[in-house]
Image (cartoon, rainbow, N blue to C red):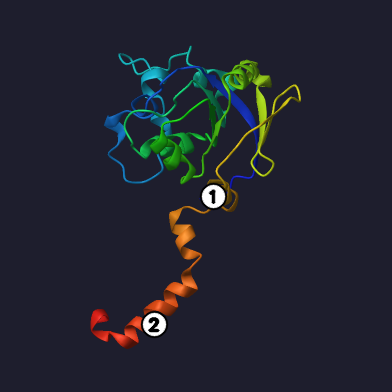
Amino acid sequence: MEKFTKLTAVAAPLPIVNCDTDKIIPARFLKTLTRTGLGKNLFDPLRFDPKTGEENPDFVLNKPAYRNAQILVAGHNFGCGSSREHAPWALLDFGIRCVISTDFADIFYNNSSKNGILLIKVTPEELDKLMEDAERGANATLTVDLESQEITGPDGGVIKFEVDSFKKHCLLNGFDDIGLTLQKKDQIDSFESKQKSAEPWLYA
């Protein structure tokens, strides 16, 4: 997966509490087994009019200033509901690399980090400040530095954040589960070679 080191990008405010994965990507779009193509249906119930299919001009990601946002400043308990991995796939395909909130559903939190999305937990007071920053429209630019674990706002203010050391290692190096396994390729090859010699019938 793509490494996450330092990101400077527009942040979109999404102050919806308990935004579940069915809002992020509705079940009817889960037919694909690939990680691409889901971005066009991200937040479908919110982005589009259910009767006409036209864009909802009031939804934040449809507004010109936020169409290329790569950071979401979201309400409490983002990503709750179904455990579908398609939710982070849809976010990533749309271009979202980081979500900031006061809390996330556990499975969504783990799925996101394994797909290269940094989820940051902040205090309610810090979220209020970041939400205010994100509401600045074209000037709603935040810098997220994973190495130093800092968020820098458009006015220069800095918020420190905590992150699990293992998730940080994986994100900085672009390691998903397969990438982590391949770090042991030499040991795996050595083991298989010995196994083939000791028990050749297993490989017949």
Image quadrant assignment for residue 79: top left
Disc 2 on helix, strand or loop? helix
187 versus 106 height, above or below? below
89 versus 175 height, above or below? above
Residue 98 point in image, percent of width and height: 55, 34
Task: Name the residue at 45% across, 30% down.
Answer: 104
Side of 145 where 36 appears, left or right: left
Residue 124 point in image, percent of width and height: 57, 19
Q: Which amino acid lies under the numbered mark 2 shown in the image of this protein?
A: Ser
- Which residue is farthest right? 156
Of 97 and 172, nearer the camera is 172
The reply to whether the C-beta atoms of the residues labelled 1 and 2 are less than 8 Å apart is: no
Q: Which mark is residue 193?
A: 2
Q: Which amino acid lies under the numbered mark 1 shown in the image of this protein?
A: Phe
Residue 52 point in image, percent of width and height: 33, 14
Task: Name the residue at 36% across, 20% down.
Answer: 45
In this view of the protein, can residue 149 be seen by the observer? Answer: yes
Of 10 and 81, nearer the camera is 81
Q: Which residue is mark 1?
A: 166
- Which residue is farthest top? 58
108 versus 125 height, above or below? below
Task: Name the residue at 66% across, 28% down.
Answer: 142
Of 39 and 145, nearer the camera is 145
Whichever of labels 1 and 2 marks the residue nearer the N terminus, that label is 1
Q: Which mark is residue 175?
A: none
Image quadrant assignment for residue 68: top right
- Separation of residues labelled 1 and 2 (CA atoms): 30 Å
In this view of the protein, can residue 38 be seen by the observer? Answer: no
Side of 105 where 146 appears, left or right: right
Disc 1 on helix, strand or loop? helix
Side of 191 where 116 appears, left or right: right
